[in-house]
């Protein structure tokens, strides 16, 4: 049962990682478009950094779960 719970959590984290990557790409595209239009990007760039930190935490969670599945 222990491994089953880890696999369940890992599946959710994997989904979160994929969704996070999608959101990062959207935010990066938004910043590129804002720069192209000579708009202020500092808030969007700050948000991107926050999102990257969150993504790093998700990646760490994924690695933690994978290591728990090692024999």
Image (cartoon, grey):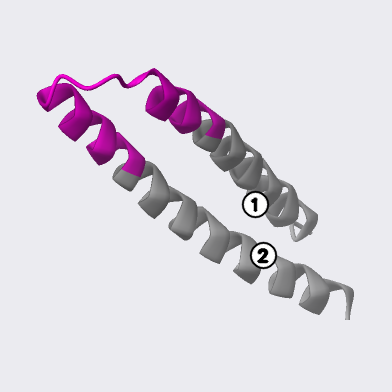
Work out whether 25 lies above or below 45: below
Please state which of residues 16 and 8 is positioned toward the viewer in this rendering. Answer: 16
Q: Which residue is mark 1?
A: 62
Q: Position of residue 12 (x, y in %)?
A: 63, 68
Whether residue 59 is situated above or below residue 42 in the rendered picture: below
Q: Tell me which residue sits at (27%, 30%) in the image.
A: 31
Residue located beneath label 2 in the image: 10
Bounds of the magenta span?
27-50
Asked if 47 appears above or below 10 in the picture, the reply is above
Using the rendered view, name the quadrant where residue 66 is placed: bottom right
Q: Secondary structure at mark 1?
A: helix
Who is closer to the viewer here, 15 or 26?
26
Q: Crowding at label 2, few (<14), some or many (≥20) Cα neighbours within 10 Å?
A: some
Q: Residue at coordinates 67% horizontally, 65% vertically from top-left?
A: 10
Q: Residues within 10 Å of mark 1 (few under 14, many from 20)?
A: some
**Residue 65 counted in the magenta span:** no
For the C terminus, the image quarter is bottom right
Q: Residue at x 66, y 47 (%)?
A: 63
């Amino acid at each position: 049962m222990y491994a089953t719970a880890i696999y369940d959590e890992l599946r959710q984290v994997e989904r979160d990682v994929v969704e996070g990557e999608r959101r990062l790409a959207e935010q990066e595209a938004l910043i590129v478009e804002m720069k192209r239009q000579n708009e202020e990007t500092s808030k969007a760039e700050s948000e991107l950094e926050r999102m990257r930190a969150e993504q790093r935490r998700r990646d760490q969670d994924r690695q933690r779960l994978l290591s728990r599945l090692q024999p």
